[in-house]
Amino acid sequence: MKLVVGLGNPEKKYENTRHNCGFRAIDYYASKNNLTFKNKYNGLYAENIVNNEKIILLKPQTYMNLSGTAVRKFVDFYNIDIKDILVVYDDVDFEIGKFKIKRGGSSGGHNGINNIIENLKTNDIQRVRIGISKTKEELISYVLGNFSKEENEKLEKILPIISNIIDDFTIYDINKLMEKYNTNNEK
């Protein structure tokens, strides 16, 4: 069983913000696979079977800074191993339209991933970091701001790739995912 967590903030007003890239990726995947979300443990979740492996998609509804509380409840309830978790979220260290799969490490200052690290008591969390570009703007205003039309188009182009990564997470370990997707994304 795999748990794929998309980070974002609930409420309509945050729907198209930069900080909601994780939700957007999960929503794209769910729409492509005709999945319906249900509510449980402060999260919206949907299930899919790919390559005979169950995938639980999770969008924590606890707001970004408390994402780990919902993730912890799902990990405990389903008895999910840390190596079977993949978190998808926004990252200012990459340009819009780029992404990077990462094995683990620090939160890089991202409050959502930081809260997951705190709640799971490990920084060995596998991730897909979606670029939202650096800014000279005040960070909170920037990440809670909406994408421009051009930025949105760039994001939309990588959502099918993120969807493929989610499917491939059922058959490949993180090293193979990084080898397959990070190299192609850098070209």
Image (spheres, rainbow, N blue to C red):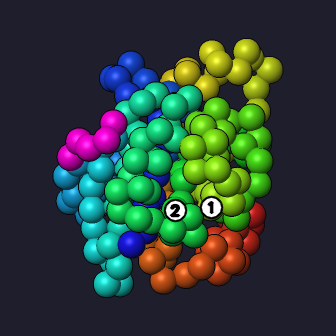
Amino acid tagged 1: Gln
Residue 9 among those drawn in magenta: no
Residue at the (65%, 81%) spot, across then down: 176
Q: CA distance from mark 2 to mark 1?
A: 6 Å
Q: Is residue 126 above or below residue 5?
A: below
- Within the image, what quadrant is residue 116 found in? top right
First in residue order: circle 2 vs circle 1: 2
| Quarter in which the N terminus is drawn | bottom left
- Give the residues in magenta: 38-42
Q: Is residue 144 left or right of residue 37?
A: right
Decide whether residue 41 is among the magenta residues.
Answer: yes
48 shown above or below 144:
below
Q: Are marks 2 and 1 in contact (CB under 8 Å)?
A: yes
How far across and how far down the image is residue 123, in percent?
70, 53
Q: What residue would you read off at disc 2? A: 85
From the image, give the main secondary structure of the stretch colored magenta.
Answer: strand
Query: Which of the two residues, 133 or 79, is positioned nearer the viewer here?
Result: 79
Q: Is residue 132 visible?
A: no
Residue type (three-letter) at the residue carrying disc 2: Ile
What residue would you read off at disc 1?
126
Residue 60, by quadrant, is top left
Q: Name the side, left or right, on which 160 lies relative to 187.
A: left
Q: Position of residue 128 (x, y in %)?
A: 60, 56
**Helix or strand or loop: what does disc 2 sit on?**
strand
